[in-house]
Every structure is written in C-alpha cells, then in structure tokens.
Image (spheres, grey):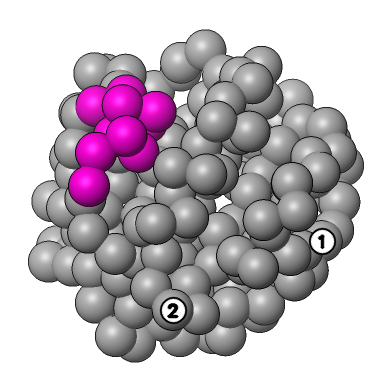
Amino acid sequence: MSALQENNINKVRIIGGTHRSRLIEFPDAEGLRPTPDRVRETLFNWLGQTLYGKRCLDLFAGSGALGFEAASRGAEQVLMVENNRAVYRALQDNAKKLALINVALRCEDGLKFALQQNGLFDVVFLDPPFKSDCLPQLLPLLKNSLVQGGMIYVESGTVFEPDAAWRVVKRAKAGAVHYQLLEPV
C-alpha cells in the first residue's frame, strides 16, 4: 500500500458543491464503509447537481459522505442519524470543521428513528450496514416521511428488490455496491 493510500484510509473527499475537495474523517467501525466517489457522482447526477431547498435524511450516516455531500450541494437541511457514539462524535467534528449550518445530527438507532414522526424529507439516503436486513422493514416506515415527489436512495451489498409499493427510478452497480433510487407508487 502506498503512503498516500495509507493516509487516506479513514478520509473521504466531498466531490461537489461549496465544499468540494474538503476531506471528512471517520474512525474505524464495524460495517462502516463510505459510499465510493463514483457511486456518489452517479447518485447526485440522478438527483441533479444541486439540492437547493431540499430536506434530506441520512439515516445511517456512517462516514457522513452522503449527508455532507448533500449539504455541500445546497440542501436546505440535512439530518444525519448515527448510533455509534465514536462515529457520531466524528460527524460532529466534521460538521463543525466544515461550518455547515444546514446539518443537524442525532445519535440514535436508524430503525427507532424511522418509527417516529420526524418531519418530511425530499430525499432519504438509506445505506445501512451491508450485513443488516432492515431494508424491508424501513421502506414502509419511511414512505410517510417523504414529501410529494420525494425519493429514497438505497445502497446494499446484494441486489435489493423493493416491494410493489415502490418504483425503481434508477439502478446501478459499482464493484460490490448495488444502489438505486426509489419513489413510492
């Protein structure tokens, strides 16, 4: 492994918006793997390069790559939920370092959070640990958390087929990452 690779193991770069090229750091944690650059690039091409006026929920925030990317691209508000305390502290540090006033953080279990009424969102980023089997449980809970025309981004380690209540808008695969954009039917 080169020195450059070694120094970037726990860092990920924001790829667009006002904070383009800024690094966010995150600790080692089981199941934590940032969404790869090329997947984020495709996702934000699907969503449109800017998210001005949009409210976003990053339910399993992890490294914060998706949430900070959305905030950098002008989202009105990004609510990031993470239950691992060390990872949550890193999210707090990154939000402070980046001075993103449109980011709010909650240290809470994603499934428990989804069971509550937490407002309406234009985009929900749903990237739970690949070993988790919570996607079928989460989608029905999150359907009522979307504004009219809202979408859910799903990232998984295997092909995920949503039930008939959802339409796949876009779908792709990069390496071991399967990802798709869903809208309620």
- Label 2: few (<14), some or many (≥20) within 10 Å? few
Give the labeled residue for mark 2.
Answer: 148
Question: In which quarter of the view is residue 110 placed?
Answer: top left
**Residue named by callout 1:** 171
Which secondary structure lies at badge 2? strand
Q: Position of residue 113 (x, y in %)?
A: 28, 34
The image shows residue 28, relative to residue 137, as above or below, that is above
Front tag of 1 and 2? 2
Asked if residue 144 is among those painted magenta in the image, a careful observer would answer: no
**What quarter of the picture does the C terminus occupy?**
bottom right
State the separation of the CA atoms marked 1 and 2. 21 Å
Inspect this view and state whether residue 92 appears. Answer: yes
Does residue 10 appear left or right of residue 147 in this picture? right
Residue 56: x %, y % from top left: 36, 63
Residue 95 location (% of width, % of height): 20, 51
To which quarter of the image does residue 51 belong? Answer: bottom left
**Stretch of the chain drawn in magenta:** 108-117
